[in-house]
Image (spheres, helix red, strand yellow):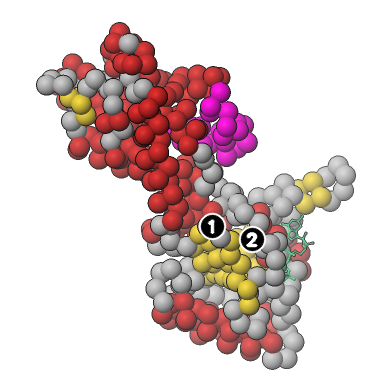
Amino acid sequence: MDGLQTDDVAEKIMAAIKNVQKNMTRLNIMVMGKTGAGKSTLINQVFSRNLAQTGVGKPVTQQIRKYELEGFPLAIYDTPGLELGGDNAIEELLKESKEVLTRGAMRGIEESIHCIWYCVSAPSHRFEEAEIEFIKKFIDETSTLCVPVIIVLTQAYSKKEAKELMAEIEKENLNVVQIIPVLAQDYEIDDEYVVKAYGKDTLIDIVHNVIPEALRNTLAAVQKANLKMKKRRANAIVATAAAAAAATGAIPIPFTDAAVLVPEQIGMIASITGVFGIPIEKATITALLSATIGTIGTTVMGKTVVSGLLKLIPGVGTITGGVISASVAAALTAALGEAYIAIMLMVAKGEMNIKEIETAEGKAKISKIFKSKLSLKRNKQGVSEEKEAE
Ligand SMILES: Nc1nc2c(ncn2[C@@H]2O[C@H](COP(=O)(O)OP(=O)(O)OP(=O)(O)O)[C@@H](O)[C@H]2O)c(=O)[nH]1
Ligand SMILES: [Mg+2]
């Protein structure tokens, strides 16, 4: 691909990214629990934008507030400052939360509450009577709406205490998905002893399993507590795109035009970007293309390099009539996707700045990853193709 064509494809990818982001179904989570339980802390430590700190939220009912950010497909319904045990506040919350759940359920997937996190502070040590009453009633009266409830034992810096509390709650046989201890933020006992945060990744895995498939990429995108989950979603996107590219099959050679990137690959890059939730600019995409697929282009590196690179992939011998085989299309697509995931992971871990992709070193790094992914494919597929030939 020459500069102009790369630019054109980058443009298409940017449009596809915008589309993916625009079409992400919003995830709605309701967070409940007493004041000081650690709801706001948990939300801030799990999601990649500071939702709970961005203001007072929009009152949905007397006690329930909705937190949202423009262009971020997440809504948090919070019951801030709730004091259980006090007179009719509890009855009121029960009524209001039922209202919110019912209203949402009637309006379809976009407005439904998809999961409830009921937070109980682990250091408070016992599950208070008033709280048991509340949650029992709440679960009972909302069971027909089938919204999954997860009990989160927050501030669980003492795993022993958390275990005891968990045993106590389990005795109640509540109809909840799971009870899990979480320490959302490192807990400093003194200067020398700090308990490391834990459990947020497990919480995300549980949520992933209980929400509809249509919301799982959204969850991957909005959370920052479970990179493995982002990676799994991204790998699935690559597998689908590679299979689709193989089915599309005939990609014309030489790879001098935008046709190198079939729509499947454009969609793949856009979807992976969506799942990682990392803002990206066109110049970065252009750099990514030129360091991967672009290196195949004859205008960039000459015919000998083209054939050299293509030797990395299986099935090249089957090029006939100016098109590449299905397995080459799949291998190229998969290598591009996997290289992009590797980069996104480095960026998400803070090991690399996204703008670094545009530097000479960044491009060299990506190019190396892409080529190693291609040759890995050769090894893997080489074996299976030999087997098939037998
Ligand atoms: N170190 C540490 N502190 C926590 C954690 N969770 C909560 N806290 C602390 O506990 C206090 C209360 O936490 P919040 O997150 O504000 O509690 P909340 O449930 O949002 O409280 P309301 O908004 O009043 O309903 C804060 O001082 C937090 O710093 C945690 O996981 N680790
Ligand atoms: Mg709060």
Q: Which residue is at 63% across, 88% downward? A: 92
Q: Position of residue 98 (x, y in %)?
A: 53, 83
Q: Nearest the camera: 111 or 209?
A: 111
Amino acid at the residue labelled 2: Leu
Rendered view: 58 above or below 68: below
- Give the labeled residue for mark 1: 72
Which residues make up the magenta segment?
339-359
Ligand 2 quarter of the rendering: bottom right
Q: Which residue is at 36% across, 22% downward? A: 2
Q: Does residue 168 show up?
A: no
Circle 1: element type: strand
Q: Nearest the camera: 271 or 382?
A: 271
Looking at the magenta stretch, what is its main secondary structure? helix
| Crowding near the residue tagged with mark 1, few <14, some 14–19, many ≥20 C-alpha atoms within 10 Å | some
Residue 51: mark: 2
Question: Which numbered disc, 1 or 2, marks the residue that appears first in the sequence?
Answer: 2
Q: How many marks?
A: 2
Q: Position of residue 47 (x, y in %)?
A: 60, 55
Q: Quadrant of the N terminus?
A: top left
Q: Which residue is at 58% across, 49% downward? A: 224
State the residue lying farthest toward the left. Answer: 321
State the residue lying farthest toward the top. Answer: 304
The answer to whether the residue labelled 1 contacts the one labelled 2, judged by CB atoms less than 8 Å apart, is: yes
Is 174 in the magenta? no
Q: Quadrant of the C terminus?
A: top left
Q: Does residue 84 show up?
A: yes
Rendered view: 259 above or below 156: above
Q: Position of residue 250 (x, y in %)?
A: 18, 30
Amino acid at the residue labelled 1: Phe
Query: Is 363 positioned to the left or the right of 120 in the image?
Result: left
Report the Cα–Cα distance between label 1 and label 2: 10 Å
Circle 2: element type: loop
